[in-house]
Amino acid sequence: MEEAAAHPYVPTDLKLPGYVPISMSMSTILTVYLGASLFVVTFVWFLLGRKKAHLDRLLMCWWAFTGLTHMVLEGYFVFSPEFFKDTTSCYLAEVWKEYSKGDSRYAGRDSAVIAVEGITAVIEGPASLLAVYAIAKGKSYSYVLQLAISLGQLYGCLVYFITAFLEGDNFATNSFYYYSYYIGANGWWVLIPLLISYRCWNKICGGANGNGVETKMKKKIR
């Protein structure tokens, strides 16, 4: 029978049979993640968005970054229920072993977290990449799509934080991991979607008002 191995997570009585300790350092994990993110942002900025306005290029970079994060990182978590048993030093498994220090619900396979991450990885991830294309090509649905994804991200964050609060909000190894991983890493998916939602709402309303004025002018001319 497989016995529970010692782990660094809270609560300490969390059962993780077969747990294999992290083999990568935090600095290595962050360096790889930041390096890959920088590559994606640079690629989008200089190649895909070179003919667009600076704000559109920034938005394309954000949607490419967040889309790949959702699909690759969060997708791996959703479809790898025993990542904490990984013995191969797989980078994606190491990411979630490390992140679980800030929220042990990931290692413990909390149902609310799995549901939120599953929707994010399967729906919001591909939709984010579609947003890159929509902005690049100036598609009419660009603002509606960006608003929908941003609202989905905000809803996911609300569920994520509220369920943790209702369950006692005691899933971090210490205050450092709580504020850097649980709060800091997720805070960007609250702040940026809020700003994008506000901009898209104004653009959509502005477009609707413009069409209304144009229709009235046409009627007067007739």
Image: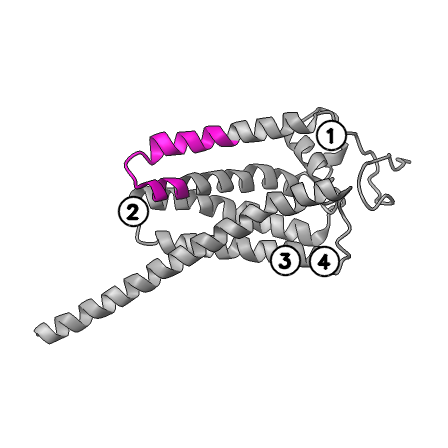
Q: Nearer the viewer, residue 65 or 123?
A: 65
Q: CA distance from mark 1 to mark 4?
A: 30 Å
Residue depth check, mark 2 versus mark 1: number of the one nearer the observer: 2
Q: Which quarter of the rendered picture does the N terminus lie within?
A: top right
Q: Nearer the viewer, mark 3 or mark 4?
A: 4
Give the Cα separation between the discs numbered 3 and 4: 10 Å
Mark 4 Cα-neighbour bin, 10 Å: few <14, some 14–19, many ≥20: few
**Quadrant into which the C terminus falls:** bottom left
Identify the amino acid type marked 2: Gly
Residue at screen point 79% across, 30% down: 20
Residue identifier under label 2? 138
Residue that mark 4 sits on:
165
The amino acid on which the numbered mark 4 sits, given as a three-letter code, is Phe
Residue drawn at x 73%, y 30% as measured from the top left: 86
Q: Secondary structure at mark 2?
A: loop
Pick whichever of labels 1 and 4 is earlier in the sequence: 1
Residue 179 place in picture, x, y as percent: 68, 45
Graded by Cα atoms within 10 Å as few (under 14), some (14 to 19) or many (20 or more), the crowding at tag 3 reads: some
Disc 3 and disc 4 in contact, CB within 8 angstroms:
no
Please indicate whether residue 177 sits to the left or right of residue 19 in the image: left
Disc 1 or 3, which lies upstream in sequence? 1
Left-right relation of 213 to 191 = left
Type of amino acid under label 3: Val
Three-letter residue code for mark 1: Asp
Magenta segment range? 37-59
At which x and y percent is residue 206? Answer: 30, 62
- Residue ID at (58%, 48%): 187
Name the residue tied to disc 1.
86
* Disc nearer the start of the sequence (3/4): 3
Q: What is the crowding at mark 2: few (fewer than 14 residues within 10 Å), some, or many (at least 20)?
A: few
List the residue tagged with mark 3. Answer: 159
Cβ–Cβ under 8 Å for marks 2 and 1: no
